[in-house]
Amino acid sequence: MTDKTPGIRPLLTVGHRLDMAARYCFPVALTVSVLMLLSMPIGLPGQAEMQPAWALASVYFWSVYRPASVPAGAVFAIGLLLDLLAQGPIGLGVLILLLTQATALRFRRFLTRQGFAVVWLAFTGFAAAAAAVEWAGVSVITWRLLPVQPALFECFMSIGAYPLLAVMLIRAHRTLAAPEQA
Amino acid sequence: MLRLSIQARQAIARLTLPVLIVLSLGIILLGRATPYVPERARTALSDALAPIYAAGAVPLSSVRDAAADIGQVFTLRSENLRLRAENERLRRWYDVAMALDAENATLKANLHWIPDPTLSYVTARVVADAGGVYARSVLLSVGPHNGVRKGQIALDANGLVGRVTEVGHRSARVLLITDINSRIPVVLEQSRARAILVGENTPYPRLMYVAEGTHPAEGERVVTSAEANAFPAGLLVGTVHYGSGTQPLLNPAANLEKLEIVRIFDYGLGGIMPPEAPGRTAMAQ
């Protein structure tokens, strides 16, 4: 919580604390619920690629703007859920999301001061790297050269969907996920 | 709560991420070394989520139907004309089929033909698209004591869907024929040439090892072969389709993109079991 005006205050009430906790939990809860929603047979085109794309965009966004709300343990759990919902080699999604978070945290001081276009541009790098690592990882683990198209498709889907997701996530970031507003 | 010095807390905070990254590498190795561990974990998660998915499936399918209805309103007239023409053609085929059926029955009676046993099957709703980017499979919601076992065969209304690879208490997973690990012995119906249907994670699996000298014709029907005792003979898989290349592909008869309900048949076959867990090629049982 950002404390801009120092001074003595009354203790927080229970309702207030609950509200703050809920706001802290919002990013992870949203990520997990959308992941589960995307695993249902909705029949959207490219639905299989939406799951990793959503997880990546969400972890990236919250790591940059609200790192306190996505601790490494939560990212680990999100990755594990992603791996268990899909059929790929287990652990690879966890690794990719953790590396994403580590890199995003390293550059967040720079990224938070930039406009949307730069943040999106940085995300294209993350998406490309994630798709490349996933393709290479699955290829090595199953020991055969897999077609490149799914990886490319996943990468472009992540990049293309990011602005749309960012619009919603930025609104959530300023309202629902803001513990200082509790 | 444990009281730690500020330095210790900072050190822990800095170490969490690297430790978790190493842990994820460990999970990758563990999953590779013991494929049954992630399989169990997946089945447990599927079992836990199956009721939630099943609850969501009903409103979901009504929403999807409504969307489809709206789309159909615009093509009502042309669709009606097409159906009328098709109905007329089918009526003629119906007469032919009835005559052939009667003839077949008399011939079988004369030959003392042993009739095929009636099959037991269960019908299940597809509750989740469980493939991910590098696999093609679906999750079924099946009740406890359902009789569904590994290796049983899944069909939809039109054709072969795949085989059951994992069974939990409330859920079962079906590996689709389009998955990269799927290998199915098939026969081309006209030329009787044998081939292997190889999934490639694309909508059109490839027909490989077609006997030399036979050229699969576009639109030729492809059915399962009883070789290797993994499938019964004669289940419709799809039709031959040439894409942009010269390699024969298969256009699946089953609507694999929009599976809603599948039937799981028990043919009592145990030739080759499906792979232990998708993502691995080992067939050993």
Image: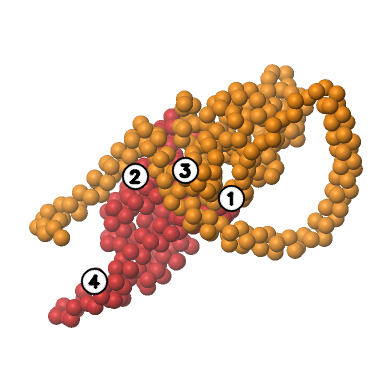
Chain colours: A red, B orange
**Marks 1/4: CA–CA distance:** 50 Å
Return the chain for callout 3.
B
Pair 1/4: label in front: 1
Kind of element beneath mark 2: helix
Q: Are marks 4 and 3 in contact (CB under 8 Å)?
A: no
Residue A74, how many percent across, how many down? Answer: 32, 55
| SS at circle 1 | strand
Q: Chain of mark 2?
A: A
Chain ID of residue with mark 1: B
Residue positioned 31% across, 42% down in the render: B24
Of labels 2 and 3, the one closer to you: 3
Residue drawn at point x = 36 percent, y = 42 percent:
A91
Indicate which disc residue B168 carries. 3
Dot 2 corresponds to which residue? A95
Percent across and percent down for residue B143 are 52, 48
Q: Which residue is mark 1?
A: B125
- Near mark 1 (Cα within 10 A), the count class, few <14, some 14-19 or many ≥20, is some
Residue B274 percent location from the top left of the image: 52, 31
Q: Secondary structure at mark 3?
A: loop
Whether discs 4 and 2 lie on one chain: the answer is yes
- Quarter of the picture holding the C terminus of chain A: bottom left
Q: Is residue B18 visible?
A: yes
Which amino acid does the dot numbered 4 rest on?
Thr
Determine whether, in the image, residue B279 is placed left or right of residue B120.
Answer: left
Q: Is residue B50 above or below residue B282?
A: below
Disc 2 to disc 3, how far (Cα)?
A: 27 Å
Residue A137 location (% of width, % of height): 40, 37
Q: Which residue is mark 4?
A: A2
- Cα distance, mark 4 to mark 2? 31 Å
